[in-house]
Image (spheres, grey):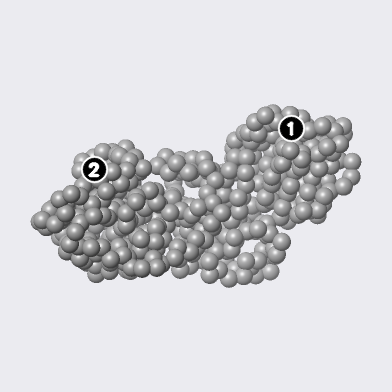
Amino acid sequence: MLFFVGLWVLPGMSHAEDGQASIYLNDNKLGGSDSSKVEIINKSVMIPIRMVAEEMGYTVGWEQKTGTVTIQQNGTVIKMVINDNNALVDNQSVVLDNAPVIKSKTTLVPLRFVGEQFGLQVSWDNKTKTASLKQLSGSGGESQPPTGSGNAGQGEEGTIDQGLAQISGISFSENRLLVATSSSVTPRVFTMSGPDRIVVDLPNTEFAANFGKDLNVQASGSLQVTDYPLVSQIRYALFSTDPSTVRIVIDMNEVTGYKVTQEGTSLLIVDLNHDTNDLDPEIPEAPLPETPDAGTGTGSGSGKKIVVLDAGHGAHDGGAVGVTGKLEKDFTLSLTLKIEALLQNNSNIEVIMTRDGDTYPELVERAKIANNANADIFISVHANSVAGAPSASGTETYYKKSEDKALADIIHKHMVKATGLKDRKVKSANLSVLRNTDMPAALLEVGFLSNKAEEAILFDQDFQDRVAQSIADGIKEYLKL
Ligand SMILES: [Zn+2]
């Protein structure tokens, strides 16, 4: 695996002074004279590898002639050479932030590399000069078992002889990492900082033979993420061969909460639409159902109800790409224009479009259009996609604020009848346009462009007419018009 890791930037740090630094492994302070030898070199925290590896029960070897440190853990062999940025993990090259160095007869290696290779959560407190390493598996860990998953430790000891699950697709859509698998997996998900990232380890998995053609020979690759400001890129690699483990790293621009769920046995979702400190938000039902007063009108002086329709994506942001290459942005605009035409027949409704051509208003701008217009409701139209799971299908509706729920329920009820697709229900998600609108809002995922049959039907004009009518009906029912 060729596994480039970026600089671990720790601005404003100076060298830890002798005698000050300490290392904690699973909250136990490591003793010995080595513990004071933590150094900051080129902004990377460097720790004494022998002490840490031995403490974890790994075998550490040293070859004086070549300056090679060898660490063996559960069949994986890591080789590092003093003053060389290239390490070998099971004979595959890994590029280190910093080359290992010898200081006072002690070999120091980057803390972050140790964390990534040994599956540890690592952190550095610059005030107290404390490096902290935590093992995440087992009872003392901080991993987040997926909702509804089975035994989190399954297979980790290698005692359960079962076939490996195949990873057939990795994609990122609507702030969710979607991993398609051939059978159920038990992920270990944890965060690392400096830079911030979410690590998803999938034990007992391997890449399917037909996994993305861009997968290089070292079985690693990356997805650049441009449309979601929280995330810079997704990296993935075969991280370990014993047990065979695929690791996916979400490089974050900003810290966020997340929620891990599984749909059936073939789709793992790491949903970033969750606030920090609120990993599993339970959005309460509105204490009183929304009861809009149809007679007086709240939005405009004309007494008309103001409906803002938002066609998802646009311009440079094509959104999801369908099986045959059709774009989500074209579907959303076409359907939204049809809804507009239907609502304009109603003299009690004024429609405002966030876009009516191939343009891209920023997400916050879309919400602002509705807020400035003092709109009564906001509806955002999208289509779904998931790589590697061609059979994923169905219609779902998202809400965020408690006042969104009644609107989402009514629209979804009408829409799912019209699409005739699998009912994926009404779900909560912290999506920008839902969060930033001051009025009831809902985001509709009509169907899956990654499903060949659904892509075809989503672009069918009769289907669009039917779905547009159902959404217009839902809007009118909600507004009591
Ligand atoms: Zn979309």
The residue identified by callout 1 is 40
Observer-nearest residue: 80 or 56? Answer: 56
**From this viewpoint, is residue 181 visible?**
no
The residue identified by callout 2 is 355
Q: Residue at x 69, y 46 (%)?
A: 122
**From this viewpoint, is residue 285 visible?**
yes
Q: Residue at x 16, y 59 (%)?
A: 465
Q: What amino acid type should be assigned to the residue bearing mark 2? A: Arg
Left or right: 480 as drawn, with respect to 175: left
Picture quadrant where residue 398 is located: bottom left
Left or right: 479 as drawn, with respect to 180: left
Q: Position of residue 245 (x, y in %)?
A: 60, 55
Q: Position of residue 96 (x, y in %)?
A: 66, 36
Q: Quadrant of the N terminus?
A: top right
SS at badge 1: strand
Left or right: 475 as drawn, with respect to 238: left
Q: Quadrant of the C terminus?
A: bottom left
Observer-nearest residue: 199 or 185? Answer: 199
Within 10 angstroms of label 1, few (less than 14), some, or many (20 or more) residues?
A: some
